[in-house]
């Protein structure tokens, strides 16, 4: 059965969970007052979700693939920012592993979806 909404896309669902986590952890401790870092990692996380949603409604598989590539790159940005968070003591090693596993899962889901859409062209 074809998808009828971006909310049915697994990578979007996972990104939504990631964004919730990001908002929770960035509202704690020193991260709460490091507005530059906090806002950047939040924006990158939201960008994953938003690009998947925008791509779904873009009108063509080619355009959707472009938006999925943006979402993939935003997930990479989140990964990089997680490492920054660890390096400056904002994020524990344990929490970083959890977040990195989630971003890796999102990237794999997006990558698989891109491959699928390419076969539909």
Image: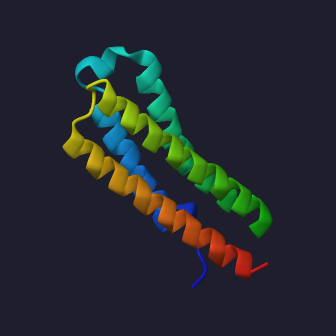
| Residue found 20% across the figure and 45% down from its top | 94
Residue 22 is drawn in which quadrant? top left
Residue 117 is drawn in which quadrant? bottom right
Q: Locate the N terminus and report the quarter of the image it occupies.
A: bottom right
Taking the image as shown, residue 22 lies to the left or right of residue 4, namely left
Q: Which is nearer the eye, 68 or 4?
A: 68
In this picture, is 97 found above or below 85? below
Residue 63 is situated, as x and y percent measured from the top left of the image, at 77, 60
| Residue found 58% across the figure and 74% down from its top | 3
Specify the farthest residue to the front.
Answer: 87
Q: How many numbered marks appear?
A: 0
Taking the image as shown, residue 118 lies to the left or right of residue 83, namely right
The reply to whether residue 26 is in sight is: no
Specify the farthest residue to the bottom.
Answer: 1
Q: How is the image coloured?
A: rainbow
| Residue found 37% across the figure and 16% down from its top | 34
The reply to whether residue 44 is in sight is: yes
Taking the image as shown, residue 117 lies to the left or right of residue 75, namely right
In this picture, is 112 found above or below 25? below
In this picture, is 46 found above or below 84? below
Residue 14 is situated, as x and y percent measured from the top left of the image, at 41, 58
Q: Locate the C terminus and report the quarter of the image it occupies.
A: bottom right
Q: Which is nearer the eye, 5 or 82?
A: 82
Specify the farthest residue to the top.
Answer: 33
| Residue found 71% across the figure and 61% down from its top | 64
Residue 71 is situated, as x and y percent measured from the top left of the image, at 59, 51
Residue 9 is situated, as x and y percent measured from the top left of the image, at 51, 66
């Amino acid at each position: 059965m074809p998808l009828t909404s971006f909310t049915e896309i697994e990578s979007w669902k996972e990104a939504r969970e990631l964004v919730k986590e990001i908002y929770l952890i960035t509202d704690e401790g020193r991260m709460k007052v490091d507005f530059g870092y906090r806002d950047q990692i939040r924006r990158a996380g939201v960008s994953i979700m938003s690009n998947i949603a925008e791509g779904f409604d873009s009108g063509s598989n080619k355009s959707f693939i472009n938006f999925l590539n943006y979402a993939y790159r935003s997930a990479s940005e989140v990964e990089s920012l997680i490492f920054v968070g660890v390096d400056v003591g904002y994020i524990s090693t344990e929490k970083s592993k959890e977040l990195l596993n989630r971003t890796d899962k999102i990237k794999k889901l997006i990558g698989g979806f891109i491959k699928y859409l390419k076969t539909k062209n």
